[in-house]
Amino acid sequence: MGWRRVAGQIGRSVTVWAVSTLTMLLLAGLLPDFRLQSPDGDSATRIAVTAACGAGAFGLLSALVWPLLVRMLLLVPALFLGLLVFFLNGSLLLLALRLNPSGRGEVAPETAVIVAAVMSAVASATGGALAVRDDDAYRRRLLRLADRRRRATLPCASTPGLVCVQLDGVGHDVLTAAVREGLMPTVARWLAADGIIPPTHRLTAWRTDWSSQTGASQLGILHGSTYDVPAFRWYEKDRGEVMVCNRPTSAAELQRRATARTGEAGLLAVDGASRGNLFSGGAGEQALVLSIATRRRGRENRSRAGYFAYFSDPANAVRTALSFFAEIGREIGQSTRARFARAHPRVGRGGLYPLVRAFATVVERDVVVAAVMGDLLAGRTAVYADLVAYDEVAHHSGPDSRDARQVLRRLDRSLALIEKAAEHAPRPYRLVVLSDHGQSPGETFRSRYGLTLTDLVRAGSGLPVPRGAGRTPSGAEARAAVRAALGRGEPESGPAPRSEPVVLASGNLGLVSFPDVPHRMTKEEIDARHPALLPTLANHPGIGFLLVRSAEHDGVVLGPCGTEIPLAELDERPGPLARFGPGAADAVRRTHAFPHTADIMVNSWHDPATGQIHAFEEQIGSHGGLGGAQSRPFLLSPLTLSVPEEDGEALTGAERVHGVLRRWLGELNGPEVPLDAGPERRAA
């Protein structure tokens, strides 16, 4: 068998080399600045030998030198690595022609970029097509892409492993519509949407807490606690700082608090891998994880090592770089079409957004999927990965837009790749797909009313209001991935001026804090200080309800026309919460109990008939508060696992989803490890 394997490898290498030689000959005939013969002309045999030597030298350099170049370029921001791919690949071709013993090859530098890109793509396609026919070769190729050679030699458990893929921002209704419209054939096959074959998976909707965003949901799913995470960004008076879930320092602090509260390292503590997430989940293998992005580089911090594992294959680098630029062109075309069609609602999509979108929908997706495939083939016990592509596009194009639906189609292909890798894994796997929240559509608050939430708060407080409404920063998770790739976090916010209220936005959830008051202010204190503020907010047509602390009732919900309902009476008198559906009262009461809940919590208007809301950020698809599809994500699980809602009650809160995943790991004989477990037990 050993000799057959070696012979097979040699045969595949020779075939790839021959195809590369023919490709080089063809390109030399088509491109005027690429020549494989002397100015006086050469025989066909001499030209063929020159092409063969050039192709061989280029292949060897790609295999030996390229990984070293990429490892050195880990010091370069990963976002720019794709931009350097063509230059580096072209440089290798120039070097290969210089090393050619025939001395005949010559190419212009700009043409070398094209030739190298085409040859890398052809070689990759040929090698992949040949390898797919050989299960062992296919497995080795995928292991090489994900840099898992070392792990592949270790013994692997025979019990099933669990792999969880998070489709960021994809709501339950969006998924079912995509299956119905044929956009996600892989998911449709699992659910037996055609009614021909029996289903392999079940689809379950679950409900988020009030803070319907990745920071809270993923912290709860991976670490079992969403306590004291009132929003995507909030002001902490005791520390004088703004916490932002996609800021590396904040993510690290939130993870520390969650592990201290639960006493456990996380869902992935036993032989787990965390890929593309805000938090580690206690995994020993981490790549593109935000909570470790600020640590000093070392063996314990391999957050950006996933980029090396992927881009060390030059064909991957070329393919992803080409897709990156194609996605930029697609975004420019789509935004231009929307502008000329005067689509409504619409937000600005210029500046760096095309680059951010291309990074989220191409680079982050390709790197994370390759890492997950490597984890499966390495036989890891538990894997959790986040794909943020849909969430980023839906923020700017709308959750039901044609642009967002195209992303769903590509995400389905990623799920098919992961499923294929699982077939070649050394152990069986249970593939779970889930989302952390949905998205609700609607015109922005600023676009609808001509002012921002900050402007409204300042007006109600008797402070001057700027003539032009300022824009709040987007909370899109893709920006967190970009900043981690650049080795930078969201700019740190210093203490706010003592006399100014701090107004922050998390989708359609607003938070107002007064930094000069050390405690959470009561309604009575706010009224005494700014008598017009609470009535101004509560009676505005774009605001659904307010939550404030009360000296008399502990906490109250405020609505228009003087509505004031104590939290204890919300079940009997939901008032303005009635339009936000079941569970709203419990979510509000839970957030009220958090130590860092803002002085005033503001939830936007919501139309239950259309599901629309008004985001306080510049997003026409948003999430972060109550109202519509944003609070209704999904959980897609194999039928071989137990039913998620064992008690028959609706699955509510990310902490309960964490409990379900823990139970499934137990069923698969992969229990979690407490935080104080010894190293011997952790390695088991």
Image: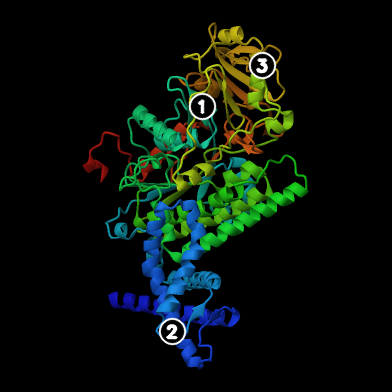
| Residue with the mark numbered 2 | 103
The quadrant of the rendering that contains the N terminus is: bottom left
Q: Does residue 661 appear to the left or right of 673 in the view shown?
A: right
Q: Amino acid at mark 2?
A: Gly
| Residue at the (30%, 35%) spot, across then down | 674
Query: Residue 542 at x, y = what percent?
Result: 70, 25
102 relative to 538, above or below: below
Q: Closer to the camera: disc 2 or disc 1?
A: 2
Per the image, label 3 sits on a secondary structure element best described as helix
The span from disc 1 to disc 3 (Cα, nearest Å) is 21 Å
321 relative to 303, above or below: below
Q: Amino acid at mark 1?
A: Trp
153 relative to 279, above or below: below
Who comes first in sequence, dot 2 or dot 1?
2
The span from disc 3 to disc 2 (Cα, nearest Å) is 79 Å
| Residue with the mark numbered 1 | 234
**Cβ atoms under marks 2 and 1 closer than 8 Å:** no
| Residue at the (53%, 7%) spot, across then down | 551
In front of the other: 417 or 362: 362
Q: Quadrant of residue 10?
A: bottom left
Q: Closer to the camera: disc 3 or disc 2?
A: 2
| Residue at the (30%, 38%) spot, across then down | 673
Who comes first in sequence, dot 1 or dot 3?
1
Per the image, label 1 sits on a secondary structure element best described as strand
Q: Does residue 472 appear to the left or right of 366 in the view shown?
A: right
Per the image, label 2 sits on a secondary structure element best described as loop
Query: Residue 478 at x, y = what percent?
Result: 53, 44
The span from disc 2 to disc 1 (Cα, nearest Å) is 65 Å
Q: Amino acid at mark 3?
A: Gly
Query: Residue 563 at x, y = what percent?
Result: 67, 13
| Residue with the mark numbered 3 | 460
